[in-house]
Image (cartoon, rainbow, N blue to C red):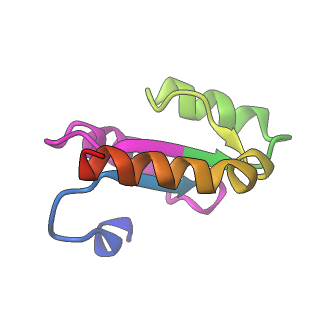
Amino acid sequence: GPDALLPSGAIDLLLVDWSAREPDWGERLVAWRGASPRPRVIVFGPHTDLAAHDAARRAGLGPMWARSRLVSELPRILDAERRAVSGA
């Protein structure tokens, strides 16, 4: 399950492919977001799966990103996260 993929230390950023999720992904992600310090969660999936977008929003995970947007924005996202974590 997804818990096996998590490191034992603090989590700064979770990138989650919603289409690869298990049935209780939403509940687990909400719990992980409640961790301290609170990790940033970016959920992504097919832009055509409107039901998945709604499910992610209902789970309190914010808007789901289209895969194509994640691919184009990933370098900027990772750089911003690196700067936030390092305090630079």
Q: Is residue 85 left or right of residue 71?
A: left
Q: Look at the image and say whether residue 46 sits in the magenta stretch.
A: no
Between 16 and 20, the one lying in front of the other is 16
- Give the vertical position of 55 relative to 49 (above or below): above
Range drawn in magenta? 19-42
Seen at 47% across and 32% down, the residue is: 61
Between 6 and 72, the one lying in front of the other is 72
Q: Is residue 85 left or right of residue 70?
A: left
Q: Quadrant of residue 74?
A: bottom right
- Give the vertical position of 16 relative to 33 (above or below): below
Seen at 33% across and 38% down, the residue is: 30
Seen at 54% across and 48% down, the residue is: 77
Q: Is residue 44 left or right of residue 86?
A: right
- Place of residue 45 in the rendered image (x, y in percent of width and height, measured from the top left): 70, 50
- Is residue 75 visible in the rendered image? The answer is yes
Q: Quadrant of residue 65?
A: top right
- Is residue 18 visible in the rendered image? The answer is no
Seen at 64% across and 48% down, the residue is: 44
- Place of residue 15 in the rendered image (x, y in percent of width and height, measured from the top left): 50, 55
Q: Is residue 74 left or right of residue 15?
A: right
Quarter containing the N terminus: bottom left
- Place of residue 29 in the rendered image (x, y in percent of width and height, measured from the top left): 37, 45
